[in-house]
Image (cartoon, helix red, strand yellow):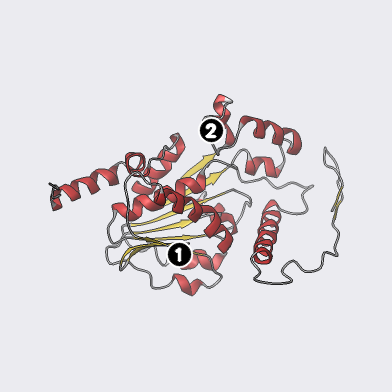
Amino acid sequence: MSQIITKQQINNILSTSRKNPDLWMRSFLGVEFWEKQVKISESVRDNKKTAVASCHGSGKSFSAAAITLHFLFCYPGSIVLTTAPSFRQVKKILWQELRYMHRNAKVKLGGVLLGTELKVDDGWYAVGIATNDSNRFQGIHPRTGYILVVIDEASGVKQEIWTAIEGILTTENSRLLAIGNPTEASGNFYELFRSKDVEKFHISAFDLPNVKQKANVIKGLTTWEWVEDKKKRWGEHSPVYQSRVLGLFPKTSSHQVIPLSWVEKAIERWLVKVDKLKFGEHQNALGPISAAGLDVSDGGADRTILV
């Protein structure tokens, strides 16, 4: 004989789940957060704006996917918007994690799950958007007032999108989670770390359990061997080491011609073109390979590189 759950019992479950995001994720999703991931999830619970500047391989998109599901299912009638500089990043990074978590949850969560959308009910959904059109962010105001905006790879998101997102975060129960590698010491993501009304986190590779213990404690996180390799290859004072290993915004140098953020954006544009070619969207997506590049070194340990 099935037991009927009362409305009061449901409210009690929701109240406990909202207060304990880490408990909910372990109980419902079956995922374990390490220390800073727990603090970030609690910050989204308690603060209007949370910014996370992270090293490479810290599980930041994994965290964002779990936080998205927690917010969506613990606040009935809520809306979660996720965005990134490109649709490839939206679909293949954060939403890939989210789809896996939803399908493999310990407790069946429900809703209709598509590639970059999870609909629970009318006006109650999560969706991934990547666009240069800021109008797509207009007029999104849930009846309940509960809305979470997750910005992945936040350093690369354009100014007009940030401005449109600010127009969404007008209710008392609105939340912003901006995460990314700190590749550029300017722009909206950088400015969050200079703002007093933002809860800020820096995740260094040396914070990670795998690096601390010099063992593969959590699969998928950066390893001690990777950090040691990058120390030798990049040097501890290089901008890419500061960003990718220490989770810090890179300092500018008199020897630096091309900012790290330009390199990151160029790599992303290349990956987008590769995807389009792979899936037949454009026959000549890559164009003719008829260019060479020469990076002439100056002082220090740099090398002259020809590609």
Using the image as rendered, state which of residue 78 and residue 100 is in the foreground. 100
Q: Amino acid at mark 2?
A: Asp
Q: Residues within 10 Å of mark 1 (few under 14, many from 20)?
A: many
Q: Which quadrant of the figure has residue 288? A: bottom right
Mark closer to the chain start, 2 or 1: 1
Q: Which mark is residue 165?
A: 1
Q: Is 17 on the left or on the right of 257, as rendered?
A: left
Distance, label 2 to label 1, CA atoms, is 31 Å
**Percent x, y for residue 191?**
54, 54
**Percent x, y for residue 153?**
56, 54
Q: Which quadrant of the figure has residue 277? A: bottom right
Secondary-structure class at tag 2: helix
Q: Which quadrant of the figure has residue 243? A: top right
**Percent x, y for residue 234?**
74, 39
Q: Residue at x 71, y 53 (%)?
A: 259
Badge nearest the viewer, 2 or 1 = 2
Q: Amino acid at mark 1?
A: Ile
Secondary-structure class at tag 1: helix
Q: Residues within 10 Å of mark 2 (few under 14, many from 20)?
A: some
Q: Residue at x 84, y 57 (%)?
A: 293
Using the image as rendered, state which of residue 64 and residue 300 is in the foreground. 64
Is residue 48 visible in the rendered image? The answer is: no
Q: Which mark is residue 179?
A: none
Judging by the rendered image, the residue that carries numbered circle 2 is 207
